[in-house]
Amino acid sequence: PPYNTAPMSDMKFDATGFFRVQERNGVSWFVDPKGFAYFSVGVEQVKYNGHFSPKLGYSPYQKNVQELYGNPEAWAKETSRKMKQFGFNTASVMKNRPGQTYLDGVAYTLIVQMGSGFVGFSDLSPITINGFPNVFHPRWQEFCEYRAKEFCENLKNDPWLLGYYIDNELDWHGSNCAAFFIHTTTGKPLEYGLILDILNKPDNHSAKQAFFRFLTDKYKDIAGINKAWGTKLKDFGDVTSANVFVNGDPIPLAKGDAHEFLRIIADKYYSASAAAIRKFDPNHLILGTRFAGWSQDPVWEMCGKYCDIVSVNHYGFVDLENGTAKETREMLNHVVTLCRKPIILSEWSFVSLDSGMPCQHGAGERFDTEEQRAEAFRVYQSLIFEQPFIVGSDYFMWIDQPSGGMASASNPEDCS
């Protein structure tokens, strides 16, 4: 169907029939299929089936809307009406193409789950949150193309698709750092846990072999490594056993090489996944990988190199007394200097303790009242609108989570 939503701005660019990005006078914009400037105000978890509650044995949201609307089509029609009424114009992070009723003025984004889909076959880091794929495996490129063909080829002519997220919150910090193993000095997750995971692999693992080839090409032999690192390693095996990397934090003189190899990992991940998507769908944007709050500098850089947009899930804190979100502002400005691409703040929210839900598990700063929560929302979204390099934001989320927790014991979120 034609893209027939009313433009949200009279600022006009060339129309291509698909969403794209363009800068004008130092400000980045999405451009909608008709050529109008567009800021994506998205919301996640817009879905009829809601979230399964292990305690109940069913999804309370799905039960309620089924009783209220009778079928998914009626629910979707009313939901899209409400989304537009509330100011949302994007149903974000869908795992498949939404129903036809969404096409009434609501764009959508799709998550391909490229890397997380390969983790079960071969990994650098096993699944703790989402794991990390073995990008050195000889079938990594083949899998990317298989996944892109499956997810993207049939959507290449859809004007309502804003773009693709490649993945969500991959464990760029490795299994030791996936739960945000915090460095006591910097207060940030340790940077090189992914390389520690590689070193803990069997010697015949393709990623471990790639790391040793990297060292051999650079230093020729163990004597060269010892000179560079100030160590007394007997052979390459000692790189694993001699505490060069401890909890993902290498000895100081090895950090440069760890940093360089992390760049190689990121380059292989983004180059293959982005190329595969563009092969089967050259019309739509690649929106990055929804980083879990913070990532390493070379990863931001490689994401910016290969993606049209860089996306970050960031549950920042708001100082209501001063009406500021200083830490989020600083983080975003740091990221854009590295990635040099427009940014989507792809997941954020706040929680109020008087909402009627337990709100004991899940992300987001807690406030005492809904009024305080609304003010935090205003401050945070205003900050997002003010940044000339941000082209959208996705609020988490449209539906309430089950009061008894959702999905599993390892994911007991229970927030409104």
Image (tube, helix red, strand yellow):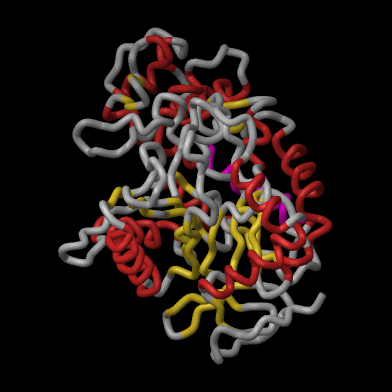
- Above or below for 301 versus 194: below
Quarter of the image where one finds residue 60: top right
Main secondary structure along the magenta-highlighted residues: helix
Q: Residue at x 48, y 53 (%)?
A: 396
Residue 208 horizontal/vertical position (percent) = 55, 21
Q: Nearer the viewer, residue 405 or 60?
A: 60
The magenta span reads 265-279
Q: Nearer the viewer, residue 56 or 99?
A: 56
Q: Nearer the viewer, residue 355 or 296?
A: 355
Q: Residue at x 42, y 80 (%)?
A: 26
User: How many marks overall?
Assistant: 0
Residue 173 horizontal/vertical position (percent) = 43, 34
Residue 95 horizontal/vertical position (percent) = 68, 49
Q: Is residue 161 shown left or right of residue 42?
A: right
Residue that sits furthest to the left in the current view: 321
Q: Residue at x 67, y 75 (%)?
A: 105
Residue 264 visible in the picture: no
Residue 103 visible in the picture: yes
Q: Is residue 122 shown left or right of residue 191?
A: right
Query: Is 276 covered by the magenta stretch?
Result: yes
Residue 229 horizontal/vertical position (percent) = 31, 24
Query: Is 161 covered by the magenta stretch?
Result: no
Look at the image and tell me in which quarter the N terminus lies. Answer: bottom right
- Above or below for 3 versus 158: below
Q: Nearer the viewer, residue 392 or 234?
A: 392
Q: Is residue 320 shown left or right of residue 258?
A: left
Q: Is residue 52 shown left or right of residue 293?
A: right
Q: Residue at x 70, y 60 (%)?
A: 75
